[in-house]
Image (cartoon, helix red, strand yellow):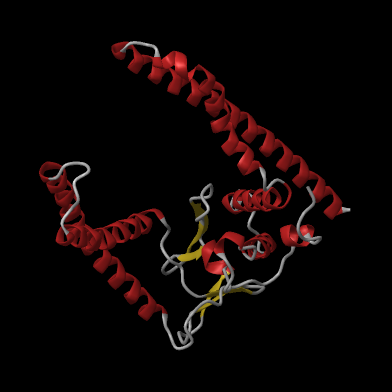
Amino acid sequence: MKPTTPDLETELFACRRYYEADHRRNDTVEQQQKRERIAKWVLGILAIVFTPIMVALFVYMSRNYAPREPLPWWFGLSMFCVQTISIPSCFYTIFCLVLPKPSFGRWIIVNTGIFHRYGKSPHRFVPFASLRSVHVEGPKSPFAVIVFETDYEPLRIAWLNFSSNKSISHNDDFLPFLNFLIDRLQRNGWNETGIASLLDLQRRHQERQVWRRYFRYTEWLMMACYFFPLFCVLPFYRYVCMVPYPAIIWVVMLCCLVVTMIGLALNSYCERWKNKKVAEKLRSIKQEYRQ
């Protein structure tokens, strides 16, 4: 498979200035954080209040109405309203717990440090000399956050903030930004042990970039690994149905276990094949780039 763009080497190894520009023109960091806190509190309260009501309505429906009996209009309306409020607020609350803390603003790298600004807020300059240590939160997840320990409050840079009005799933701006950051830190005397977490994050983003361009159809192949054993078992469906009642439960459980184990084994094999091919392709690109 050929890449979708001819400049994949530039995207993987370019050292350019990238920063996030998705902000309101007259906004500040404090105002944005205040809105985030209010939204979290409101939706959290809605989830706590309406989720027990939704469960109580389900229990009431199961006890007072038959499975195929039509429900009264008032009960259906109340159930619809409660579900409309409860389910989105629960999902938002879960996402707030899973996703990293937001890191607002523009991040502009210069020779001696990083400029940070959000909207009308004053510039904050953090020189590289004042950075004490660096680590990456969630390097294996798609929501990685670079955290610099400074003399004052920590400096947080999340790669989701580099969308620049583009789709997050097709965000390619963070990798050149990370390359430029590693290059500046190495020039300022940081050895590889100090930026080992950044180098690991760089390698993972490069692998994702190569995987997306060269092996983007392997996801469908891995998904097929779980359906292939199921189709192999379907011809024996009528024989399974002939098993008497007490034993059929154990037979069905055994079939599910076998199908799941075969699917996991095939998926693991495809995952190893994909990682090997991505590593080989990335190695060849690096050699061509160095030449």
Q: Which corner quadrant of the image does residue 91 belong to? A: bottom left
Q: Is residue 277 visible?
A: yes
Q: In percent of the image, x 79 and y 62: which residue is there?
A: 7
Taking the image as shown, residue 96 lies to the left or right of residue 181, namely left
Residue nearest the viewer, comparing 243 with 134: 243
Horizontal and vertical percent position of residue 45: 21, 63
Q: In percent of the image, x 63 and y 53: which residue is there?
A: 205
Horizontal and vertical percent position of residue 67: 21, 41
Q: In percent of the image, x 67 and y 59: which residue is there?
A: 186
Judged from this view, the residue extending furthest toward the right is 291
201 over 219 or under it: above or below: below
Horizontal and vertical percent position of residue 211: 68, 48
Q: Which corner quadrant of the image does residue 153 belong to? A: bottom left
65 over 146 or under it: above or below: above
Residue nearest the viewer, comparing 205 with 146: 205
Q: Which corner quadrant of the image does residue 44 belong to? A: bottom left
Residue nearest the viewer, comparing 33 with 216: 216
93 over 60 or under it: above or below: below
Horizontal and vertical percent position of residue 28: 42, 82
Q: In percent of the image, x 46 and y 68: which residue is there?
A: 103
Q: Is residue 158 visible?
A: no
16 over 47 or under it: above or below: below
Taking the image as shown, residue 49 lies to the left or right of residue 185, namely left
Taking the image as shown, residue 264 lies to the left or right of residue 45, namely right
Judged from this view, the residue extending furthest toward the left is 64
How many numbered circles are shown? 0
